[in-house]
Amino acid sequence: MFVQSHTPFAALVEGDGQQEGLRDKCVLVLGGDWDACRVVAETYGFRNVITPGDIITAHPSVWPFARVFTQYYHTFAKPLPQGIDAADPSKSLKIDAVFVFHDPRDWALDIQIVLDVLLSSQGILGTYSPKNNNPDLPNRGFQQDGQPPIYFSNPDLLWAAAYHLPRLGQGGFREALEGVWAAVTGGPKVGVELQKKVIGKPYYETYAFAEKKLELHRQSILGAKAADVPLRKVYMIGKLEVLLLEDIKLTTSSGDNPESDIKGANDYKSPSGREWCSVLVRSGVFQDGTPAWKPKTIVDGVSDAVVWSLKDSGWDPSSDLQHPDYVHFQPSPDLDPPSGPTRRELARSPNLPDQSG
């Protein structure tokens, strides 16, 4: 099972009670290299996925400063299902949802296109809603004319990459978009906000989704035995490793960012009554000092978090974990590499679609 920050978007293929199903709707996907996120979205079940690269390739005048990226976009752009017809909006492309799957690469183009969509009428590109800036309407008329919802998959402003200092993440892009949105609409000072949905850590939906997927994954491993012994404890260690244990009481979530990983684990209230225990590692955004959100313990790296969690649970790795019903975890020397692509970087790669069903 491989679950990433954007994996909960898969639930919107059929709809989630608030958002109608988007399987056959036109969705705009942002982020990642080339069209890797389009491929992931399609594996989730979305059938009509477009990217900013498709739009700028079909209509270069949308953003006049994209010539330096022209060759790059041509390597993966696909024809749009409809073009942009300023004279006849009924013939123009309609966007039904915007998803930021991963950290955008070309912020300028992406912000311009998202701005166009959010200022449009009904999500139709090339239009401008007559309701915009109407003081008699909620949000001064902005996003009150059938514009599509916009979803972000990761709130992290900073994240740990190969460079020795934290780098801007998807949260940086969102802040930039909100800054431009405020400059164009007047922003909070005139009562306008960017209406959006953010998932990912530390938001409840992400932890609930992960817990559900872990339970389903455990059932697939244990089969009929899963019903005999209810899951009371799950150790979730690191970004790629998941260690499932049977017949225990606690959930441990390990992370390197106090603002997202630790806060989310501390705040999450499991519907099944499982306690979540947060373990902060020093191999990512957090290096030293006093974290903004207090974890149960702080260790040097992911492998140390695994060892600590096993000891804290009272399990004997030499005996209990030899049972074939358990998923084994072997700490390896490259678990917390000092340089090069980090585990966090690899875990956020959009080239690895969710295989959890």
Image (cartoon, rainbow, N blue to C red):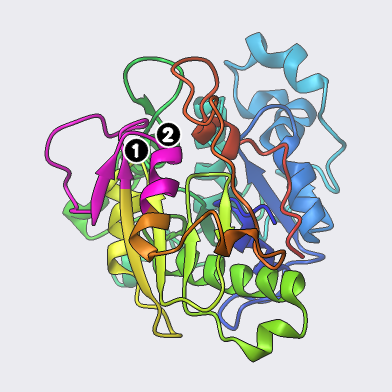
Picture residue at 34% right of the left edge, 38% below the top: 157
Residue with the most extreme left position: 290
Q: Which residue is mark 2?
A: 169
Q: Quadrant of residue 231?
A: bottom right
Residue 100 percent location from the top left of the image: 56, 46
- Badge 1 local density, few (<14 within 10 Å), some, or many (20+)? some
Q: Which residue is mark 1?
A: 157
Picture residue at 73% right of the left edge, 27% below the top: 34
Q: Is residue 47 left or right of residue 221?
A: right
State the separation of the CA atoms marked 2 and 1.
Answer: 5 Å
| Residue 224 is inside the magenta segment | no
Secondary structure, mark 2, is loop
Q: Are marks 2 and 1 in contact (CB under 8 Å)?
A: yes
Boundaries of the magenta span = 280-308
Residue with the most extreme bottom position: 228
Q: Closer to the N terminus: mark 2 or mark 1? A: 1
Q: Mark 2 belongs to which amino acid?
A: Gly
